[in-house]
């Protein structure tokens, strides 16, 4: 199994970047986790526009879903006329996207470009060679983190979350954990517990016995080396900071 970071940023991207999006590939099958702003452009640096076999959206916040609108346009209006593909969506995603689509010509719907499958906490689904387990994360809207297994390897993706025990079974002995590391150790205890610091992400990786930690969802103004350092203090495994184009094998 192979991971490629398409969008590494949280909330908004830096120049030339994108918000959350991760390609997971195995045996010629490609799964895209989240479609934040800029991901449709960035994914074409790695695969063809219609070489995506399935999409999973973790929650309804724009920096994880807004380019699903762009991708629907591409799938509907391209002369290639690609077939529909599976789209797994967390709660509220369809409800929040539908009014935007209804205002467009022809009252468009996600189902015109995708086979839409709701996914909720506790669900287990399959997409090609991938077995996917979803659990509820600690965020401000319904959010699913996922464990993706194929070929004897496991990848965990926290999406957006504060510290939660629900992340542990997803990350247990995973070859790679992509974890929300939106914040740093700055002593701000008044922040709502809807994201993790790099250290909290690392503590989760250590407890779960993950092999590699990828820090994700960092806002552009943060010092990435500081986040890496804070994570390395709490986790002895390999620590990477997500950057667009990062490609890694999942052990």
Image (cartoon, grey):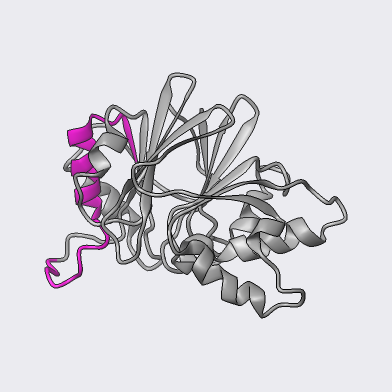
Q: Which residues are magenta?
A: 187-213
**Considering depth in this image, is 96 or 185 the residue closer to the camera?**
96
Residue at the far right: name it. 79
- Asked if the magenta segment contains residue 199, the reply would be yes
Residue at the far top: name it. 152
Q: Is residue 99 above or below residue 128?
A: below
Which residue is depicted at the point 77% across and 59% down?
A: 76
Q: Is residue 44 left or right of residue 159?
A: right
Which residue is depicted at the point 26% across and 35% down?
A: 169
- Asked if the magenta segment contains residue 156, the reply would be no
Q: Is residue 126 above or below residue 190?
A: above
Q: Is residue 29 above or below residue 98?
A: above
Q: Is residue 166 left or right of residue 148?
A: left
Q: Is residue 14 visible?
A: no
Q: Is residue 175 left or right of residue 249?
A: left
Expressed as whole percent of the image width and height from the top left, the position of residue 3 reads: 50, 37
Expressed as whole percent of the image width and height from the top left, the position of residue 226 reads: 27, 55
Which residue is depicted at the point 33% across and 29% down?
A: 174
């Amino acid at each position: 199994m192979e991971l490629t970071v398409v969008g590494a940023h949280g909330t908004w991207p830096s120049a030339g970047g994108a918000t959350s999006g991760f390609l997971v590939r195995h045996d010629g099958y490609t799964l895209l986790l989240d479609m934040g702003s800029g991901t449709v452009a960035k994914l074409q640096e790695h695969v063809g526009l219609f070489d995506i076999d399935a999409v999973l959206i973790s929650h309804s916040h724009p920096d994880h879903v807004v380019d699903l609108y762009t991708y629907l346009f591409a799938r509907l209006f391209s002369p290639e006329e690609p077939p529909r593909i599976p789209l797994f969506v967390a709660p509220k995603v369809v409800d929040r996207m539908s009014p935007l689509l209804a205002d467009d010509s022809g009252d468009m719907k996600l189902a015109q470009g995708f086979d839409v499958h709701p996914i909720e906490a506790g669900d287990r689904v399959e997409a090609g060679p991938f077995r996917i387990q979803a659990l509820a994360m600690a965020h401000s809207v319904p959010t699913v983190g996922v464990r993706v297994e194929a070929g004897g390897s496991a990848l965990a993706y926290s999406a957006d979350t504060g510290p939660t025990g629900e992340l542990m079974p997803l990350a247990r002995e995973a070859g790679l954990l992509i974890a929300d590391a939106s914040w740093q150790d700055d002593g701000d205890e008044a922040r709502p517990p809807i994201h993790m610091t790099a250290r909290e992400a690392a503590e989760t990786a250590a407890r779960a016995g993950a092999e590699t930690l990828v820090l994700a969802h960092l806002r552009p103004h943060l010092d990435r080396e500081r986040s890496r350092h804070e994570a390395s203090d709490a986790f002895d495994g390999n620590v990477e900071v997500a950057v667009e184009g990062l490609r890694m094998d999942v052990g």
